[in-house]
Amino acid sequence: KNQVEQSPQSLIILEGKNCTLQCNYTVSPFSNLRWYKQDTGRGPVSLTIMTFSENTKSNGRYTATLDADTKQSSLHITASQLSDSASYICVVSESNYQLIWGAGTKLIIKP
Amino acid sequence: NAGVTQTPKFRILKIGQSMTLQCTQDMNHNYMYWYRQDPGMGLKLIYYSVGAGITDKGEVPNGYNVSRSTTEDFPLRLELAAPSQTSVYFCASSYRTVTDTQYFGPGTRLTVL
């Protein structure tokens, strides 16, 4: 069964610290993997997209990694800011054009 | 360029009532979607459309109906509202395929009492 699991469920860190969010998937056949950021009360916004051949992709202070062999992805946030407080959702696309959404990690940045 | 807009932002319904959630996009996207998001859960696809006149069921279509008469509009109809339909509803659109970046509206928070 196609599944996307994210960990941790929630995370609290101090402003300025780094953190890493995890995404494990069992989707097959794999097409691509996206990370979305969802601010409270808003719709998700795409941060990065990674295809099978990409290992690392950065978007400012956000760096996503993909290990297609172990079917794992991570999202690393550097020098966190209060505006990074949000839910981060991992979404994996199956080659048959089906999207499998993770439940998300809720990140809280404390001053 | 407003992107994806949804109305209303909030709504309270009584059991058995019906309503239509409106969604409009101005990006000339072919694909449009309706999702629901329950507290602490991931997004679940209700219906999607690949173009005007074409719609298809997603993961959780029961209790909902859609239509797509134009490229811009994709309304979601709730018939005979039930408490299980209490959720936040998001409309989204993408340019060509399901795997393209999806652009989301601000959501409609619906409570059925």
Image: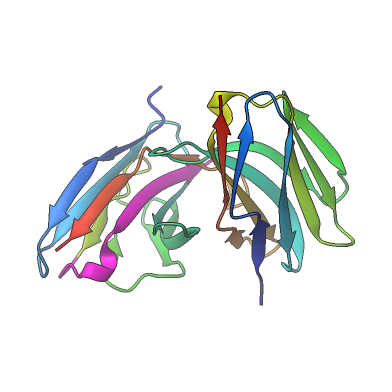
Q: Which residue is nearer to you in this view: A6 or A59? A: A6
Name which quarter of the figure residue A9 lies in.
bottom right
Q: Is residue B91 magenta?
A: yes
Q: Horizontal placement of B41 versus B68: left or right?
A: right
Q: Position of residue A41 (x, y in %)?
A: 38, 39
Name which quarter of the figure residue A7 lies in.
bottom right
Residue B101 visible here: no
Image quadrant for the C terminus of chain A? Answer: top right
Image quadrant for the N terminus of chain A? Answer: bottom right
Q: Position of residue B89 (x, y in %)?
A: 34, 52
Q: Residue at x 88, y 44 (%)?
A: A55
Q: Is residue B87 above or below residue A87?
A: below
Residue projecting furthest to the bottom: A1
Q: Residue at x 55, y 58 (%)?
A: A103
Q: Position of residue A81 (x, y in %)?
A: 61, 23
Span highlighted in magenta in the image? B79-95
Q: Horizontal placement of B63 versus B43: left or right?
A: left
Q: Is residue B90 magenta?
A: yes
Name which quarter of the figure residue A62 lies in.
top right
Q: Residue at x 21, y 56 (%)?
A: B111
Q: Which residue is nearer to you in this view: A21 or B99? A: A21
Q: Residue at x 35, y 39 (%)?
A: B72
Q: Horizontal placement of B21 versus A13: left or right?
A: left
Q: Position of residue A74 (x, y in %)?
A: 76, 47
